[in-house]
Amino acid sequence: MSSSILPALPPACRLRLDRLADRHERDLLELALIASPGDFQILVRLGELYPRLGLLDESLRIDRKLVVMAPDDPVVRYNLACSLALTGDLPAAFTALREAIRRGYSDLEHLLQDPDLASVRQSTRFVEILRLLNQSKRQRPA
């Protein structure tokens, strides 16, 4: 639910409504997944919802499944890195980020602001990711 739909509500109330909407959407998507177990778009959306609902292990499971389904998709690899970072597996998160960049991920601004990667950015190894991203951008044709 978009918070802009109900601007007159207090922020705490809007947050509760957003969480309720997220749980409702998750329930519907999980039911849809029973009917279409390999539906890529349903899995992607669940992978976005689960972390917001605090379901980090479920999110990681979904992201690993998506990497198997679309191994060359840089955003899928990036999302896996986010899930790994959120579950505390920083070495694997760095590996997934490097793979995302090798496969074409290039959104530096998002990488620098994504709250899912806060733990990654605090590591001294993050400089390596920035260097790889910069190098990758220079090597790609415009």
Image (cartoon, rainbow, N blue to C red):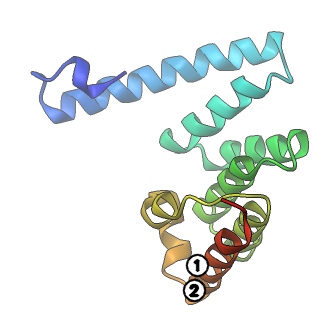
| Front position in the image: 55 or 9 | 9
Q: Say which residue appears at 77% left-offset and 72% top-offset.
A: 95
Name which residue type carries label 1.
Answer: Leu
| Front position in the image: 123 or 61 | 123
Residue 112 % position (x, y):
46, 67
On the rendered image, what quadrant is the N terminus found in?
A: top left
Give residue 41's quadrant in the image: top right
Mark on residue 130? 1
Residue 73 % position (x, y):
78, 47
**Label 2 secondary element:** helix
On the rendered image, what quadrant is the C terminus found in?
A: bottom right
Residue 139 % position (x, y):
73, 72
**Decide: marks 1, 2 in contact (CB < 8 A)?**
yes
- Asked if residue 94 lies left or right of residue 122, the reply is right
Residue 45 % position (x, y):
62, 30
Q: Say which residue appears at 83% left-offset and 14% top-offset.
A: 36
| Front position in the image: 36 or 132 | 132
**Label 2 Cα crowd, 10 Å radius (few <14 / some 14-19 / many 20+):** few
The vertical placement of 8 against 110, above or below, is above
Mark on residue 127? 2
